[in-house]
Image (spheres, rainbow, N blue to C red):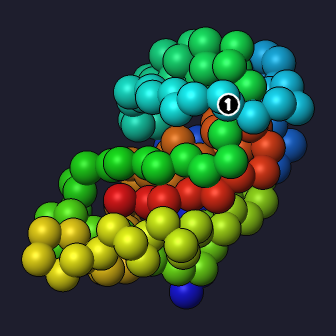
Amino acid sequence: MDRKPVVAGKFYPETPIQLEKTCEAFIGEKSKDEYFKHPVGLILPHAGYVYSGKTAGLGIKNALRFGKPKNIIILGPNHTGYGESVAVWKQGTWQTPLGTLQVNEEITSKLVDNEFIFEDEMAHLYEHSIEVQLPLLQYAFGDFKIVPI
């Protein structure tokens, strides 16, 4: 299944050109060609860009010093209350105005245990927390796979 944007035009710009310019203003440069040599962790805000974009951009800009990731495991809260408490979007893609990101199905399939961690797309369908992060990450790092939890 493909996850379409639900807050584009509300939390962040809806058109690719506007979104790219916004990301550039928050982050500036893009990633180097070399991949991370070790894991890098970030805690980023997920509100609309008018509130959180500058802070998220500074965090991502700092991570750029280390290169770029092959995979991004992204954890987001569930504001809507739909679905399971710990829900993985197990397969397919996530779309943003900047393009499509592939879910790393090899990793997601290993996470789901149906006791604590569940495959549950409903928890993600209307939730903005992960979606808002993706365009900034796409702008900075280019192509990578995601593990949305």
124 relative to 12, above or below: below
Measuring from the top left, give residue 99's x and y in whole percent. Answer: 77, 60
61 relative to 101, above or below: above
Q: Residue at x 22, y 54 (%)?
A: 79
- Residue 27: image quadrant is top right
Measuring from the top left, give residue 64's x and y in whole percent. Answer: 70, 20
Label 1: state its secondary structure: loop
Residue carrying label 1: 36
Measuring from the top left, give residue 77's x and y in whole percent. Answer: 25, 49
Q: Residue at x 18, y 81 (%)?
A: 114
Measuring from the top left, give residue 84's x and y in whole percent. Answer: 17, 73
Q: Is residue 4 visible?
A: no
114 relative to 57, above or below: below
Q: Is residue 114 visible?
A: yes
Q: Residue at x 35, y 48 (%)?
A: 75
Q: Residue furthest bottom?
A: 1
